[in-house]
Image (spheres, rainbow, N blue to C red):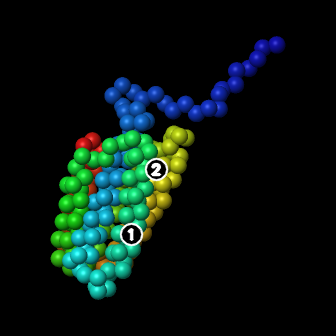
Amino acid sequence: MRMRHRPSRRFVPPRPLPGEPRIEEEVARMMRVDHAGELAAVHIYRGQRVVMGERHRLSPVIREMETQEQEHLARFDRLLQERRVRPSLLAPLWEAAGYALGAVTALMGPHAAMAATAAVEEVIDDHYARQRDRLRQWPETAELAETVERFRRDEASHREEALAQGAERTPGYPLLAGIIKAGCRFAIRIAERI
């Protein structure tokens, strides 16, 4: 009697093609850029709060967003240590750029501050969604995929809150949002590598 061959149920990720990063390298890049992004986000909200002051009507909203970003940053701090991934070498730049974006847009007014939040969070929502989908391809990164998805939902809620607070009422909103989104996409590409 001839035995039928049964395929193994153990998942074996596809081998990378020549020039493609290994899973460990790809995950390290993801964590590096996510850590840099959360670092910048914390500083965006700090810059907004400093300019707008604690008595502004948006201050509790901004403080809550900043608190969530600090939680995300703390989680990525731990992940970098656990996986022995170096953070972006440009961390001081991400802090300064985030703070400047927050402060400058807050100086332009509360709607502009919310426009910055909406633009940044739209890019991050998309970025995290792509990462989540990629991470779900590998069983060994399922927990990280769920962390990214949880953070993506937080970022999407920040965007919705910013829109509800009048982000689109900013004069020149499409132009301002477009510039901020382009800057975020550029920063993502740089932070993955440096």
Image coordinates of residue 143 in percent, x first then y, are 52, 49
Q: Is residue 155 visible?
A: no
Residue 166 image-quadrant placement: bottom left
Q: Residues within 10 Å of mark 1 (few under 14, many from 20)?
A: few
> Is residue 52 placed above or below 175 in the rendered structure?
below
Task: Name the residue at 27% across, 76% down.
Answer: 49
Going by the numbered disc 2, the residue's amino acid type is Arg
Real-space CA distance between mark 1 and mark 2, rounded to the nearest whole angstrom:
23 Å
- Residue 107 % position (x, y): 17, 76
Q: Residue at x 25, y 52 (%)?
A: 91
Q: Which residue is at 82% across, 13% downward?
A: 1
Structural crowding at the residue carrying mark 2, measured as other residues with C-alpha within 10 Å and reported as few (<14), some (14–19) or many (≥20): many
Q: Relative to 182, is 117 above or below?
A: below
Q: Which residue is mark 2?
A: 132
The residue where tag 1 is placed is 67
- How many numbered discs? 2
Q: Amino acid at mark 1?
A: Thr
Q: Position of residue 92 (x, y in %)?
A: 21, 55
Q: Residue furthest right?
A: 1
* Left or right: where 74 falls relative to 137: left
Whether residue 48 is visible to the viewer of this picture, yes or no, is: yes
Residue closest to the eye, 166 or 73: 73
Label 1 SS: helix
Q: Residue at x 29, y 86 (%)?
A: 55
In the rendered image, which quarter is residue 26 located in?
top left
Name the secondary structure under disc 2. Answer: helix
Q: Position of residue 189 (x, y in %)?
A: 27, 46
Mark carried by residue 108: none
Q: Is residue 152 left or right of residue 109?
A: right
Which residue appears farthest toward the top when viewing the image? 1
For the residues carrying marks 1 and 2, which lies nearer the camera in this image?
A: 1
Q: Nearer the viewer, residue 140 or 76?
A: 76
